[in-house]
Amino acid sequence: MTAYLLRRLLSLSLSLVAASLVIFLVMEVVPGDPASFMMGINADPQAVAALRTQLGLDEPLPVRYLGWVAGLLQGDFGISYTYRVPVSELIAERVMISLPLTLYALALSTLIAFPAGILAASRRNSAADLSVMGATQLGVAIPNFWFAMILVLVFAINLRWFSAGGFPGWDAGFFQAIKALTLPAIALALPQASILARVMRSSLIDTLNEDFMRTARAKGLSRGQALRRHALRNALIPVLTIIGLQFSFLLAGGIIIENVFYLPGLGRLAFQAITQRDLIVVRSVVILLVFAVIVVTFLVDLAYAAADPRLRRRRT
Amino acid sequence: MTKTPIAAAAVSLLALGLALGVTPATAAKMDATIGMQLEPPNLDPTGGAAAAIDEVVYANVFEGLTRFGADGAILPALAKSWEISDDGLTYTFMLNEGVKFHDGTDFDAEDVKFSLDRARADESTNAQKALFADIASVDVVDPATVKVTLSKPNGSFLFNMAWGDAVIVAPESADGNAAKPVGTGPFSLTEWVKGDRVELGRYDGYWGNPVKLDKVTFKFISDPTAAFAAMMAGDIDAYPTFPAPENLVQFESDPRFEVIIGSSEGETILAMNNKQAPLDNIKIRQAVVHAIDRQAIIDGAMFGYGTPIGTHFAPHNPAYVDLTAQSAYDPEKSKALLAEAGVSDLTLSLKLPPPSYARRGGEIIAAQLREVGIETDITNVEWAQWLDDVFKAKNFDLTIVSHTEPMDIGIYGREDYYFQYGDADFKAIMADLDKATDPAKRTELMQAAQKKIADDYVNGYLFQLARTGVANAKLKGIWPNSPTQANDMTGVYWED
């Protein structure tokens, strides 16, 4: 198990180095200069040049890359070109929204998907199964931003139960903050729950047809007991994979929903930084997301091992 | 189980929504939430050109020697009065006394000297450094008097000092203004939740007339649909520049809202590359201009909001000359000019930055040009790309931009400016204008400048961008026009 962990950690670090190089170079190729963006079209060319020097944009490429990586290793992400505050501060503020939103959406998605998937699989072809399949088909088909707008229309504009968007900050109290994240989390969770429920259902149906299930029933277990004790655990592997993918997707991909609800999350930070050519922020956010995805993949691998002891043995 | 789990989940989520409750209606309001499309990158108006910076801090947080009034007039601000020497070279400003910065330090003539010297220094990163170019020296006479000496007379010096880029900052706090602005204005920064909002609170040590609001929150919502929803849901009290003109009709029919239409300083132009073939030929530029039906663009792209212009000057300025007839829509004339110039099969590149006036307007212009036989090759670009490719590299034939700085006709005198005009006669007019202090003479010269660029068909002058806003019908005192980029909240109040 230790050797396995070490090997995983090594490949994790190599992926990060490769990613940092790619991110840095791509940002260099993109046309656009942060200094001229900040100074606008009426600016004095001399003042633009002074700003470039001040931001350190005059230094050669390798120096800037090494400076950035050296900073990252010490936990120093640099100073944002446009906001003029440490990037780590900006990211920390945004993570406090994006991470809870992701977890909230994931929790909702799992809470909806598990019962729905299990119900559909255990009563295959019943009315319940057909309604779950129908509803999830719709859930997959509806784009989440459209669903988000419908939620705003109904719950914010007509019923006035929620704000149309924005985030009061965690200082405003836990419930105020959670309330502000509720509509976005529902909008994010619905399509994910639909996918997850369908995966849960088909994985469970596959498992129910396995020989060991017949054996379990033959031993005298009821349908429900066999399902809970044997089938569920075996059906979980593909479901875990999907949950891992969904976490990464939600963390990095909430940008459209963040725009609809004007939540100051990571996705919007990256988006805004790209348009303003605040390259240092873009690089840092992207490398952080890469890091998060790698870590989540790693954790999902570990979770497989927990769910299926055979995987543990095979790898050590 | 009678319901499907999804239905059950939906019901429980609804119950959650109910449990979390409704925000209670507020009593007598002393605060206002103002919507803006873009968040300022930082809050230092002396170190960046982003309009959003001034839209938060101008007159609210920072003040200059002079300031713009709602109608564009130049009013006293930190300088209560001034004397101009007969040769127009020396300006003596008498400063208001008892003024304090938000950090409690005193404002005096030293701060004025510091601010002006900082803005014109070699290493200055002031985006409008040209405003200070004619200053030869700044001398402190006594704590309440400062004398500015110019190297040559500059008739627009008091106007220049009213810009957001010319506000007075303190040496103790100037370097930190980007994140923590310290000014002399009636509001000071209380909180900035980046990506979401800037909160300003009333500054009790303010020297001037007290403001009526306790708190102003600027909230940043870039998506037009979200902006509409926020307004309808009552999350935002006013949107002085609403991002989607198409929604204004809906607000107009709703008694809760008041639609505010004013003019801005934004001359929206179809800029042409004057030094690159084929547009270096005045006949072809004139042909392009006559092919354009301004009203169709205003109706189609701006939903009818905007005033046609025939030169690079704001129609609400008293010195404006209406030259639209000279470049009237006349496709036949346009075709004749093209024939005269001996060109056929003309294809021009048209690069469009993100604002809807450019993207929507560009499509309409392309169709209009096709009518006279000019094809266009449209490329949509982001602002950063536009700055690189069009503005700096001058790699374009046509582009559409709104020039939003007040009184910016002077850009036509810059030879390396992106549309590359810089005509010698025009520069001579501008040099005379700089020297002139007599109002009648200045008006005459400004009109000569307007006529000169219209006669040379430098660019296609489309329309003056309207400022289209919406506000809660009970919120009063919002500027209808924007003589500079600002959301002056000092006179805003709630009507009972």
Image: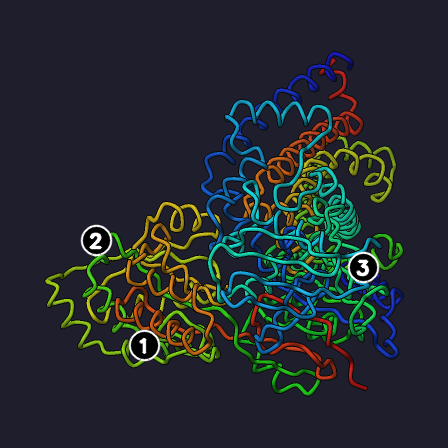
Residue B207, by quadrant, is bottom right
Secondary structure beneath disc 3?
loop
Q: Which residue is mark 3?
A: B100
Q: Amino acid at mark 3?
A: Lys
Query: Which x, y percent locates residue A1?
Result: 78, 15
Q: Amino acid at mark 2?
A: Ala
**Residue nearest the observer in this picture, B51 or A107:** B51
Badge nearest the viewer, 1 or 3: 3
Judged left or right of residue B394, residue A149 is right
Judged left or right of residue B317, residue A64 is right
Upstream in sequence: badge 1 or badge 3: 3
Judged left or right of residue B287, residue B392 is right
For disc 1, the chain is B
Judged left or right of residue B388, residue B290 is left
**Quadrant the C terminus of chain B occupies:** bottom right
For disc 2, the chain is B
Secondary structure beneath disc 1?
loop
**Quadrant the N terminus of chain B occupies:** bottom right
Q: Which residue is mark 2?
A: B277
Toward the front, the furthest residue is B86
Measure the C-alpha gap from mark 2 to mark 3.
57 Å
Query: Which x, y percent locates residue A160?
Result: 78, 73
Is A90 above or below relative to A264?
A: above
**Residue nearest the observer in this picture, A15 or B116:** B116
Q: Mark 2–mark 3 contact, CB under 8 Å?
A: no
For the point 64% across and 35% down, which residue is it?
A284
Residue B50, by quadrant, is bottom right
Q: Mark 2–mark 1 contact, CB under 8 Å?
A: no
Upstream in sequence: badge 2 or badge 1: 2
Q: Amino acid at mark 1?
A: Asp
